[in-house]
Amino acid sequence: MISYLVATFQKQNVFNKLVLWLNLFVILLLLISYTAPFINPKTSVFFAYMGLLYPVFAGVNLLFSVYWVLWKKHLFIYSLAAIMLGLLSFSRFFQMTFYQPASEHTNKIEVMSFNVRLFDLYNWTGNLESKENIQKFIKQENVDVICFQEYYRGVKVHFSVREFMEQEVGYTYCYEHITTSAKEKDGVGNNLFGSAIFSKYPFIDSGYVEFENDENNHVSWIDIVKGEDTLRIVNAHIGSMRLQNADYQLIGGNDNKKWAREKQFPQDIFTRMTRGFYRREEQLVTFKKFLSTSPYRVVVCVDLNDTPNSYAYNEMVEKLKDAFMISGWGLGSTYVGENIFNRIMPVNRIDYIFHSEGIDSRNFTTHKEKLSDHKAISCEVWF
């Protein structure tokens, strides 16, 4: 095959020789990206970055295939073959579920995971009605259990979160885990930051797991009861690259500098992203140990801060199912924040609903509404 490729190369004009060299280089990068889920970032962070760039490499290879087809060259086969080798990776970003068999289970709840970015506390979206839009969305969807990451309860939200959820939507039961609290600059009012799980069903137990390497990333959980069955709902925020304790301390004004760190020079971006890869790996050790001790089947709503072509994702699906893979439809991208990486490849699926074997998930939805820098996701859970 190599001799055939060399002979083919020699037949090309100078420009096409250059294109072919570039094509082969990008094919190599794509093949390397397929190894990312199997290599711990602490072993080599290079592969973690390659995995992150998988959509870019796949897209560029697709363009090369189109180029060779237009030139009526059979060379399109090389890029196409490389893309086909990664169909599993592709399916984790894009799904088309045409048939969903009825579940044999009788208990059903609808679960949502939503990183609300503090309910747009400082009007990052530039839309003064964004809090009300989030409120309308929650009321409209009216799921049974909703897990909030980057949750906020304090004096600046235009509506009382707890009061709204309990009185207007019917979430009688709530478990909040507060990681940080801070006074307003004028000393009036207390701002609470963390995560929350709201449920229409009672829970018999609750708790949280904190990570040693980041007090703002954590896991909270409740054991809900429906009928004669008990199910553990887990709400997790793993390995954040951007939110740090200092971000929550600057209360009382919209300090755009702390929310625009991606505009700093590339070394800072690289340093924070590398630390994020390391942080996730460390947190996943603790997280997986916690999940393994659960006395009940689990449903995990998580902002993983990593794509499906990553070591972190591969660790999660080692013993859990990805609801998107079972009943998702279309492109599953959930992160819609404004940063340079999202502009390069707006296919960042970093929010997930995982669940144990023995649970069926149906009708997975990536909600189209852009009410935060994350889209909400939801699915039916049968158990």
Image (tube, rainbow, N blue to C red):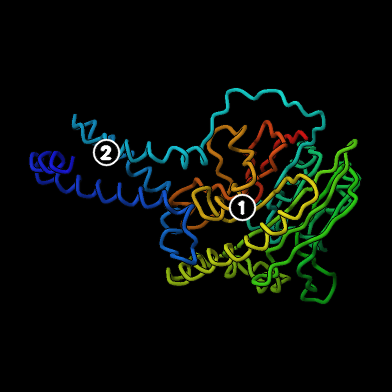
Q: Residues within 10 Å of mark 2 (few under 14, many from 20)?
A: some
Q: Residue at x 58, y 23 (%)?
A: 98
Residue 210 rendering spot, x and y as whole percentages: 73, 66
Q: Say what amino acid the circle numbered 2 marks.
A: Tyr
In the rendered structure, find residue 373 and report the number of the disc placed on it.
Answer: 1
Nearer to the camera, 4 or 255:
4
From the viewer's perspective, is residue 378 above or below residue 159?
above
In-image side of 94 versus 34 (left or right)? right
Indicate left or right for 300 with 242 as reference: right
Query: Which label number is shown at residue 144?
Result: none
Q: Residues within 10 Å of mark 1 (few under 14, many from 20)?
A: some
Tell us which disc is closer to us: 2 or 1. Answer: 2
Q: In the rendered image, which quarter contains the N terminus?
A: top left
Residue under label 2: 78
Residue 369 in the image: x percent, y percent? 64, 41
> What's the residue type where badge 1 is placed?
Asp
Check the image and report above or below for 323 versus 151.
Answer: above
SS type, badge 1? loop
The structure residue drawn at horizontal position 61% and vertical position 38%, both measured from the top left corner, is 324
Residue drawn at (39%, 48%), measured in percent from left and top? 56
Q: Position of residue 235 (x, y in %)?
A: 73, 53
Q: Residue at x 48, y 54 (%)?
A: 38
